[in-house]
Image: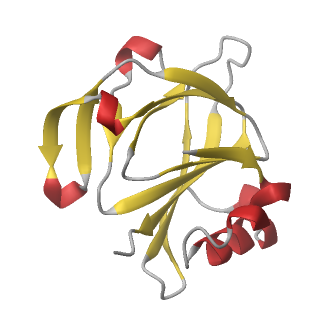
Amino acid sequence: MIFDVLANADRYALVHPLFAECFAFLRDTDLASLQVGRQSLGSSGCTVIVSESAPKAKESVRLEGHRAFIDIHYMIAGEEIIGYVPRAHCREMSNDVPNDFQELQGIAEYLTLRPGCFAIYFPEDAHRPGIGTGAHSGSIRKIVIKVPVQR
């Protein structure tokens, strides 16, 4: 897992061959004007998901993991708490292979994702996104970029 601000994203561009393109998209796009929904990012196989939702209660959010994709979460507006725990410390509860979604059980640590911040979750990471902070009661507008794992 990586957590930082977009201004430092170039430090991580070499971690994965598609990260530079993803960070350029986040830096060079008017993110506030993007429509909610999914779109392809070039021909790389990356998918951009723009969402706007109310923050959720911690109890209602499942701990999840992915094997085929790396998630880059970037906050446009609002703030949320995201849980994180290494997948090695989790137990798999369900596995939806076609949708690359595994529900996991484990004890997460939490961080706050605010505008300008990003978090990267690799297949070795479990995460629990979308939790309200209590300090922010408005909607959360964020982007998740699904980056194919290169093996």
Q: In which quarter of the image is the C terminus?
A: bottom left
In the figure, 49 relative to 89: above or below?
below
Q: Quadrant of the N terminus?
A: top right
Question: In the drawing, does residue 102 fall left or right of residue 45?
Answer: left
Q: Position of residue 37 (x, y in %)?
A: 48, 59
| Residue at (38, 17) in percent of width and height | 107
Q: In the image as oriented, which residue stretches furthest toward the front?
A: 88
Q: Nearer the viewer, residue 15 or 32?
A: 15
- State the residue in front, 18 or 60: 18
Provide residue 124's location: percent of width, then percent of height: 38, 47
Q: Can residue 60 be seen in this view?
A: yes
Classify residue 149 by image quadrant.
bottom left
| Residue 73 place in picture, x, y as percent | 58, 49
Depicted 47 relative to depicted 126: above or below: below
Q: Which residue is pictured at 52% across the width and 21% down the height? A: 109
Horizontal relation, residue 74 to residue 48: left or right: right
